Image (cartoon, rainbow, N blue to C red):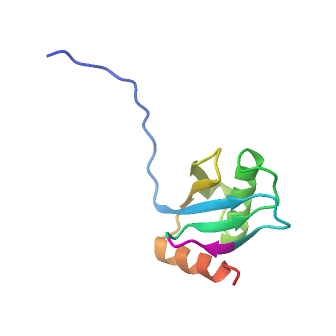
Amino acid sequence: MKRLFRKFNLHEGKRGSAVTVHVVPGSSGKRISNVMEDGTLVVEMDTRDVSGKTNQAIVKFFSGILNVSVDEIEVVAGKDGADKLISIINENTTDLHEKLMALVEK
């Protein structure tokens, strides 16, 4: 039997939660404006695109509204697209859901 050796990367696992976000660039400010049927948050941003500086701005935005360190937030998927997966370390799902739903502008 021949063994195949593939390079693989290990990632440190941490406890926390993740939230899906749809970014709408070009807004006059930063806010969570809606929740889509699938639970994705619609986040309006005052940036021009959906990548690069917008990812940094999203991390800072969530850090501020959730009162957590920027080191505990990461864009883990969708870095170049409008749909992103945001990871928040040390936040349990129930508490995070309550905090975010209270911030959705109606």
Outermost top residue = 2
Q: Quadrant of the N terminus?
A: top left
Q: Quadrant of residue 64?
A: bottom right
Is 52 rendered above or below residue 24?
above
In the image: residue 47, left or right of residue 8:
right
Is residue 30 or residue 73 the one in the foreground? 30
Is residue 15 or residue 45 the one in the foreground? 45
In the image: residue 27, left or right of residue 88:
right
Outermost front residue = 37
Instruction: Report x, y in % for residue 104.
Output: 66, 78
Outermost left residue = 1
User: Residue shown at 71%/50% (left/top)?
Assistant: 50
Q: Quadrant of residue 29?
A: bottom right
Is 92 rendered above or below residue 16?
below
User: Residue shown at 63%/46% (left/top)?
Assistant: 79
Instruction: Report x, y in % for residue 54.
Output: 74, 52
Q: Quadrant of the C terminus?
A: bottom right
Residue 84 belongs to the span the image colors magenta: no
Q: Quadrant of residue 24?
A: bottom right
User: Residue shown at 65%/67% (left/top)?
Assistant: 42
Magenta region, residue range: 33-37
Residue 35 belongs to the span the image colors magenta: yes
Instruction: Report x, y in % for residue 74.
Output: 61, 53
Query: Magenta part mainly helix, strand or loop?
Result: strand
Is 51 rendered above or below residue 1?
below
